[in-house]
Amino acid sequence: MLEARIAGRAGPLDLRVDLSLDGETVLVAGPNGSGKSTLLRLLLGVLRPEAGRIALDGSVLFDAEEGIDVPAEERGLAYVPQDYALFPHMDVLANATFGLAALDRRERVRRATSWLDRLGVGDLVRRFPSALSGGERQRVALARALARTPRALLLDEPFASLDPIARRQLRASLTGWLREWRLPALIVSHDPADAVLADRIAVLERGRVVQQGTLEDLRRAPGSDFVAGLIEAAPVPAGADS
Amino acid sequence: MRSGRASAWGAAQVVASAALVSFLLLPVAALVFTLRWADFVGGLRNPLLVPALRLSLLTTGTSLALVVVLGSLLAWRIARHPGRASRWMEAITQLPAVIPPAVAGVCLLLAFGRRGLLGSWLAAHGIALAFTTPAVVMAEAFVSAPFFVQAAIAAFRRVDENLLVVARTLGASPFRAFLRVGLPLAAPGLVAGSAMSWARSLGEFGATLLFAGNLTGRTQTLPLAVYTAMESDLRAAQALSLVMVAVAFALLFVLRRMAPGAGLPGPEVRGA
């Protein structure tokens, strides 16, 4: 379970967020400049909150009052940014094994290739990122992040760099994977279509969570113009996933 | 009308390019083509050559190593921690590039000479720097550091912040993220900066002469040997100069081979 009650600043933005994820997928939606990416950076530990507390599965990652600030590399949070940030000077296998430095080489390769296979990119191990399609890059980035067995997954605009067809395919795949992995996941997006991924939606505006709930909750009582627009543009779920 | 203007603009580019390239090439061509083989071989036997060449390679190699190690850490700090302190540090590291070399020599003497700001304290502890081989290294590092640091800052700034954040979330310490991600991605820029910095320190003359002197085998580098030979024998000076140019080209070639992308021209914009 990931719990965050934090306050932080990034330029003119004053961010105050109280959020928790309990083995579920939460979509943080909000207009540009609402603080979505800043929230991720505060959680990851690359930006330091001014106040508050972050805890993951009972262990404290940050506590301003106690003076606890676990460094990013020890937080156990996996992060996949919008452009996937594959290391361009390393091939797919080297990317996927990057986070497994603590293991011996054979185990590193076994673990990484197993994840690459699961995500359908096991035959690309010798390719460099420049030779991959957008969808392949996202799968490699996910395999790299998950090979470390993280305690939670943070995704920043996961489909923004993809063409519409790849976006639809990968959104459907990711919906299935997240259910299969049962990993707490926080997805930041401004795309209403991503609402189908989430068990719950938290709407962030000007650094504050202005409304939280399921897509249905939000549909019943939209709390702001942005939420009303989000609901209007979000796909109506025919079944559980589409 | 428009095509007439375009052709005049194209012609201006061709004429300006031809004039400047010729002006830059002619002196180097004169150095090569006005020297007879016998004079060149005679110049190679000049007693100034071997000690000066050895000293130049030793001192420029040492100053380059110092500049690259310290400069990489400084440039990383400046590139990754923008703020007032970084802006000041960047401005200060560029100072030597705008100071004339002779003035740089005076500055070094006033700082590290026997009666200098720090030099008097060093002298009291039995350390004399001026007019020694370490003084040559200091003069070369002083004038050449800005070339490396500026290139390194630019190269490190081009490294995508997200790559470093992801490296951290994958368990890399800040140092490992620098070593495995920042450094390799900036390598072409760092090699290009090293080449420029090394070339500048190999050609260093004014600051070395004033701060280190012109003592054969101790502080007389190749440019100072050329200057000394000029006083008695132009052909010997020419032969020494040719050796210096050959050494410079050879080392620059090796450096560029180490990082194939270093200093390559960017994508062409046609018709601009």
Image (tube, rainbow, N blue to C red):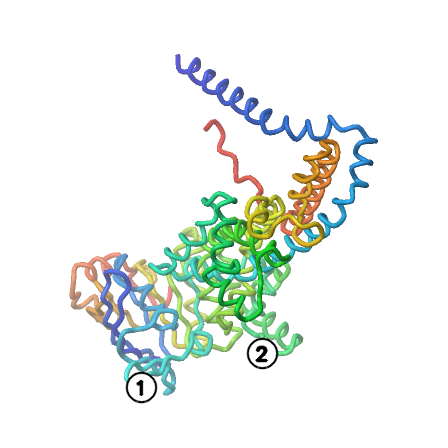
The image quadrant where one finds the C terminus of chain B is top left
Q: Mark 2 and mark 1: span between their CA atoms?
A: 29 Å
Q: How crowded is the residue under tag 2: few (<14 C-alpha within 10 Å), some, or many (20+)?
A: few
Instruction: Give the quadrant of residue B18.
Output: top right
Q: Is any atom of residue A131 visible in this view?
A: no
Residue B220 sits above or below residue A32 on the image: above
Residue under mark 2: which chain is it in? A
Q: Is any atom of residue A43 visible in this view?
A: yes
Residue B253: give x, y in percent of width and height.
Answer: 68, 45
Amino acid type indicated by mark 2: Ala
Q: Secondary structure at mark 2?
A: loop
Q: Secondary structure at mark 1?
A: loop
Residue B248 sits above or below residue B258 on the image: above
Circle 2/circle 1 CB separation < 8 Å: no
Residue to which mark 1 is pinned: A66
Q: In the depicted view, which residue is nearer to us: A95 or A213?
A: A95
Looking at the image, which residue is at 27% across and 74% down?
Answer: A50
Looking at the image, which residue is at 22% across and 70% down?
Answer: A209
Q: In the depicted view, which residue is nearer to us: A141 or B264?
A: B264
Residue B141 sits above or below residue A63 on the image: above
Residue B11: give x, y in percent of width and height.
Answer: 50, 18
Residue to which mark 2 is pinned: A102
Q: In the depicted view, which residue is nearer to us: A22 or B211?
A: B211
Amino acid type indicated by mark 1: Glu
Residue under mark 1: which chain is it in? A
Instruction: Give the quadrant of residue A120.
Output: bottom right
Residue A160: give x, y in percent of width and height.
Answer: 39, 55
